[in-house]
Image (cartoon, rainbow, N blue to C red):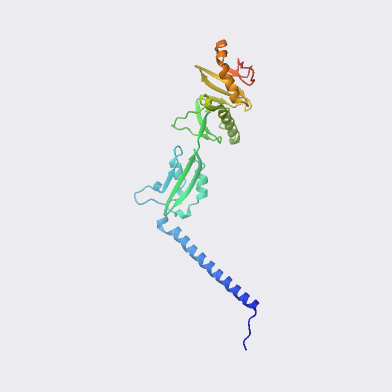
Amino acid sequence: MSATRSPVTKARIQLGLRVALIGVVLVAALYAWNRTEQFLIHDARFVMSGPDGVDDASVIQVQGAAHASRRAVESTFASDMGRSVYLLPLAERRATLRTIDWVREATVARVWPNRVVVQLTERQPVAFVTLAPSRFGLIDGDGVILPPTADRFHLPVLRGVRAGDAIADRRDRVQRMQRVLRDLGDNAAKIAEVDVTDRGDIRVTQPYEGHMVTLILGDQRFALRYQNFLNHYAEIHDKLPGAGVLDLRLEDRITVVDEPGGA
């Protein structure tokens, strides 16, 4: 007479079989993945190197580089040449690309079997800054100073920013300038210079009817104060043709400033 297995025993056997099956599947999957990975690493078809007679740089396709150095971008991948594209450390290369002049953001993508596509987003300059006497640079909205370029930009000069300032301070001053220009609307295109040396007492300079005029705008109501200048400048010019610095901080009057900082 054969013994009958209890339901508990059957359940344990079934569970054991399932666990064993899962283990076999996992081992097989790991083995298959290891074989696949070794294939991707060692097969010559995936090696980052150009065909015979073709420069290795052709392996790197760079998009969006108007000002950033293509040579600098390509040199970022110098240590990857001769190795499988599978081994390419995407995050590390992306971080390095972001340190290149003009590069604000970068993406790196593998294109099988052995190519890399780099997509750059470049920084957009918003003003000129003085780096040294008679030497200007460009600055973007993040406060990053950019190297010169042959391109021509119609931008104001931003005073009160130095290359040695902390990036957070530069960014803050750029944002103050942008706030003024946004408030001025269409009139912002006329502004030649914005001085944020005193961040609570902003000044703008522009040509107006053949003269350079500096307007002290303070720290608020920029559009209103600028419109006050437009409404009354003709009268001021008739009385004081040489007036070059106007204090607009009081809405009910315009004061002609004789000296910088005076009233």
Image x and y of residue 222, in percent: 60, 25
Image x and y of residue 79, in percent: 46, 49
Q: Can the viewer see residue 185?
A: yes
**Nearer to the camera, 250 or 123:** 250
Residue at x-position 55% and y-position 14%: 234
Relative to residue 132, is residue 24 depicted above or below? below
**Nearer to the camera, 125 or 37:** 125
In the image: residue 39, left or right of residue 233: left
**Quarter of the image that includes the C terminus:** top right
Work out which residue is located at the far left of the displayed protein and give it: 53
Residue 216: which quarter of the image?
top right
Relative to residue 85, is residue 127 depicted above or below? above
Q: Can the viewer see residue 165?
A: no
Relative to residue 155, is residue 234 depicted above or below? above
**Nearer to the camera, 234 or 164:** 234
In the image: residue 99, left or right of residue 81: right
Image x and y of residue 116, in percent: 44, 49
Residue at x-position 44% and y-position 47%: 117
